[in-house]
Image (cartoon, rainbow, N blue to C red):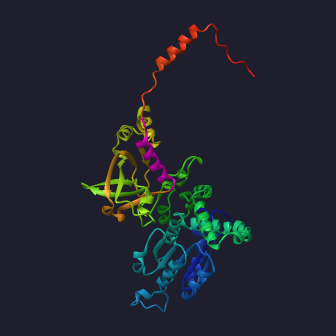
């Protein structure tokens, strides 16, 4: 739940009942203890949106209606109006705390929670913690900080030479690409490490109500932090969901064949799609890892696998299966994709118009898409030649030594 610094988490409470509002204001810091937090109350629903425009909040706790609300006009409930305005302005997780939960249950997601009003705040505390344990409030704050630091620490200091020698459009691209690079750099790795160190566990809430203790569990994110800068987290290989409307090399899509999901990766260069030259598209089959011989041997005794079985699995994962360094490419599983092994010997070509863009599961991110195409090119572009006869060469060298009257001397030390 770490906020990455000493800054307090900020709550905005939209509640017109003074007693409930006061109790919530006092309780909010306990929701995220031991981290610091402060809450602000807005008793007038019409003033909530202007507050959102003028200040930054990490979580909103909103009642659905005030005393003037007419339940026959469900779409005009003031809490829903605030929620819709929030979505237009910025990302802020929302917790509806209401006596009418059925009116907003369809809106519920990981960061939009619905809690029915009742005695005590145990259920509300649990839902607030569940929102923070998504790490989205911390990520939102981190992105704001990175953008702020870049604009003030670099752009503002170099503004004069920038506007003197470059068009202002250049700056837009520069800032956008810099923010994108931040998400690929050590900055995000350090952010994840901070989260893992500040993760909330049951031990943090030992005095919380039973409902909360059941809801908050130890996060395993500390096990997901790469051990060094030489390796990456599996999810860094992918873009999900796909943002591009056009087909690209590295797109991974699925189709049903005989009631079973099959996966394929696009190998046709992206420029062919861009220039309308892809009448036919080359695809490579992605086999399920769990169906591969190496996995079956390893999983038969996964706790204490034989050295041979373990080596086989390691070779698959490290893209050196059976000594064929170029033929296979391993794709690690995420929540949207199973473990897969691309096989460049299992290819097919299909007409472009038969492809269904809606079935794209994810895309390989750069540079992994380019690396996959390069591996494919090397595999089919390789040229095999017979090995040199080592015995002939060694015999010749031995014969040469016999005929030589001078015994070769070891090189002298310099």
Q: Nearer the viewer, residue 71 or 222?
A: 222
> Which residues lie in the magenta part?
366-383
Q: Residue at x 54, y 83 (%)?
A: 15
- Quarter occupied by residue 358: bottom left
Q: Measured from the top left, where is residue 356 in percent x and y?
A: 33, 63
Q: Measured from the top left, where is residue 293 in percent x and y?
A: 35, 39
Q: Main secondary structure of the magenta part?
A: helix
Q: Measured from the top left, where is residue 265 in percent x and y?
A: 39, 54
Residue 290 lies in magenta, yes or no?
Answer: no
Q: Measured from the top left, where is residue 375 in percent x and y?
A: 45, 46
Q: Is residue 304 visible?
A: no
Q: Residue at x 54, y 79 (%)?
A: 89
**Would residue 352 appear left or right of 192 to someone viewing this image?**
left
- Quarter occupied by residue 187: bottom right
**Would residue 19 appear left or right of 65 to someone viewing this image?**
right
Q: Nearer the viewer, residue 342 or 375?
A: 375
Q: Is residue 356 above or below residue 52?
A: above
Q: Nearer the viewer, residue 133 or 86?
A: 86
Q: Is residue 240 visible?
A: yes
Residue 376 lies in magenta, yes or no?
Answer: yes
Q: Is residue 310 above or below residue 97?
A: above
* Quadrant including the N terminus: bottom right
């Amino acid at each position: 739940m770490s906020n990455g610094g000493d800054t307090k988490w900020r709550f905005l409470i939209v509640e017109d009942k003074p007693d409930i509002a006061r109790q919530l204001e006092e309780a909010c810091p306990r929701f995220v203890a031991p981290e610091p937090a402060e809450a602000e109350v807005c008793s007038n629903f019409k003033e909530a949106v202007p507050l959102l425009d003028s200040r930054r909040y990490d979580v909103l706790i909103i009642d659905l209606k005030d005393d003037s609300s007419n339940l026959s006009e469900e779409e005009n409930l003031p809490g829903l109006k605030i929620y819709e305005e929030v979505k237009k302005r910025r990302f802020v997780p929302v917790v509806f705390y209401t006596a009418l939960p059925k009116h907003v249950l369809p809106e519920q997601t990981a960061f939009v929670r619905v809690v029915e009003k009742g005695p005590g705040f145990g259920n509300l505390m649990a839902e607030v913690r569940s929102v923070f344990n998504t790490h989205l409030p911390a990520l939102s704050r981190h992105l704001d900080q990175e953008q702020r630091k870049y604009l003030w620490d670099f752009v503002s200091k170099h503004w004069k030479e920038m506007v003197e020698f470059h068009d202002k459009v250049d700056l837009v691209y520069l800032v956008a690409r810099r923010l994108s690079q931040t998400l690929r750099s050590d900055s995000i790795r350090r952010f994840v490490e901070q989260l893992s160190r500040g993760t909330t566990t049951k031990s943090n809430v030992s005095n919380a109500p039973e409902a909360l203790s059941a809801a908050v569990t130890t996060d395993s994110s500390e096990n997901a932090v790469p051990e060094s800068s030489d390796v990456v987290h599996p999810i860094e290989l992918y873009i999900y969901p796909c943002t591009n409307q056009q087909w690209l090399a590295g797109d991974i899509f699925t189709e049903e064949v005989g009631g079973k999901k099959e996966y394929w990766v696009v190998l046709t260069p992206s420029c062919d799609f861009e220039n309308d030259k892809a009448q036919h598209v080359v695809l490579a089959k992605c086999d399920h890892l769990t169906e591969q011989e190496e996995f079956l041997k390893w999983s038969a005794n996964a706790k204490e696998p034989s050295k041979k079985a373990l080596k086989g699995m390691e070779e698959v994962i490290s893209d050196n299966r059976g000594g064929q360094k170029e033929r296979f490419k391993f794709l690690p599983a995420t929540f949207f994709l199973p473990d897969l092994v691309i096989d460049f010997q299992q290819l097919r070509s299909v007409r472009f118009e038969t492809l269904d863009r809606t079935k794209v599961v994810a895309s390989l991110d750069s540079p992994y898409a380019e690396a996959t195409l390069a591996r494919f090119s090397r595999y089919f572009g390789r040229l095999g030649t017979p090995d040199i006869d080592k015995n002939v060469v060694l015999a010749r060298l031995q014969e040469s030594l016999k005929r030589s009257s001078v015994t070769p001397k070891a090189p002298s030390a310099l």
